[in-house]
Image (spheres, rainbow, N blue to C red):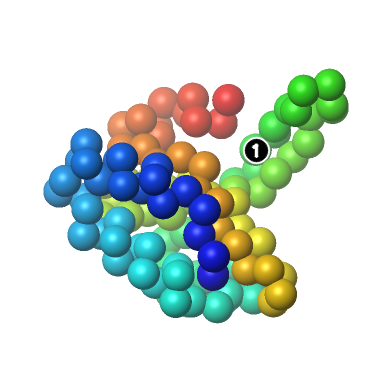
Amino acid sequence: MHITGRNVLNKFAQKHPNDKSALNRWYNLMRQGTFNSFVDLRKIFPNADQVKVRKGRFNQMPQDEIWTVFNIGGNNVRLIASLQYASNEQRVTINKILTHAEYNKGRWKE
């Protein structure tokens, strides 16, 4: 899969060095993987969940998007990404990376 947002991953790892190896493991598994559906993804990442997020765009009606939340590093980190499973364009866009405590505040959906 093609991954967009590696800089977000690196910045988080600099601030949270204890989670760097777990983030690198996630990155390598995603980069090397081919996932045709969320079911396929769960075979490698059994703790991943899908969440519906309502996002508004400038001068457009808000639309629901499905984001995938990965629990990383023994539940220390939440990586939130948009995934495209189409076989001709498999893509992961990292939207946010948060600590467990930051994620629980729920502001990431805004």
Q: Residue at x 69, y 76 (%)?
A: 87
Q: Can residue 39 be seen at all in this image of the molecule?
A: no
Residue 23 vertical placement versus 65 (above, below) = below
Amino acid at the residue labelled 1 = Val
| Residue 28 image-quadrant placement | bottom left
Q: Which residue is mark 1?
A: 53
Count of numbered labels shown in the rendering = 1
> Quarter holding the N terminus?
bottom right
Residue 5 vertical placement versus 38 (above, below) = above
Q: Who is closer to the viewer here, 94 or 52?
A: 94
Q: Residue at x 70, y 32 (%)?
A: 55
Q: Residues within 10 Å of mark 1 (few under 14, many from 20)?
A: some
Q: Give the image location of residue 90, x and y in percent.
A: 63, 68
Q: Residue at x 70, y 33 (%)?
A: 54
Q: Give the image location of residue 81, x and y in percent.
A: 53, 50
Q: Give the image location of residue 30, x and y in percent.
A: 45, 68
Q: Who is closer to the viewer here, 35 or 8?
A: 8
Q: Give the image location of residue 34, x and y in percent.
A: 55, 78
> Quarter holding the C terminus?
top right
Q: Can residue 30 be seen at all in this image of the molecule?
A: yes
Local secondary structure at mark 1: strand
Q: Is residue 44 left or right of residue 66?
A: left
| Residue 91 image-quadrant placement | bottom right
Q: Is residue 57 left or right of residue 2?
A: right
| Residue 32 image-quadrant placement | bottom left
Q: Residue at x 54, y 65 (%)?
A: 2
Q: Residue furthest front?
A: 7
Q: Residue furthest left?
A: 18
